[in-house]
Image: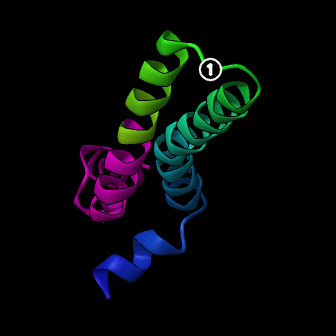
Amino acid sequence: MEMNKYQNHPLYIKEKKKFYFDRWKWVIWNAFITLCLFARLKQNYILIDFILFCLTFVATVFLLAVMPKTKFENSRECQDIKDLIDDI
């Protein structure tokens, strides 16, 4: 019952969306850069582009593996917004 009080609050919903957007935007950005580097490699092979492609690909895969494990309910931001709602 206590958690439901927070989940329906507009500030909680807004902060939860912001939390996930801030994390997933980096996954999307890295995937975009990886695809751009891949397209560039297909046109003209350059070693530095290949190295950058490999690094961004590994970073994207790492972020895809780690991001789903982070939950808003367990974060510091969630506790902060709960405290703010309680103070209101």
Q: Residue at x 51, y 40 (%)?
A: 22
Residue toward you, 71 or 27: 27
68 is higher (above) or lower (below) than 83: below
Q: Residue at x 44, y 49 (%)?
A: 88
Q: Residue furthest front?
A: 45
Residue 78 on the magenta segment: yes
> Circle 1 sits on which residue?
45
Residue toward you, 59 or 86: 59
Mark 1 closeness class: few <14, some 14–19, many ≥20 residues within 10 Å: few
Residue 62 on the magenta segment: yes
Quadrant of res 77: top left
In the rendered image, is residue 44 in sight? yes
Quadrant of res 43: top right
Relative horizontal placement of residue 47, taking residue 44 as reference (left or right): left
Q: Main secondary structure of the magenta part?
A: helix
Q: Position of residue 71 (x, y in %)?
A: 31, 62
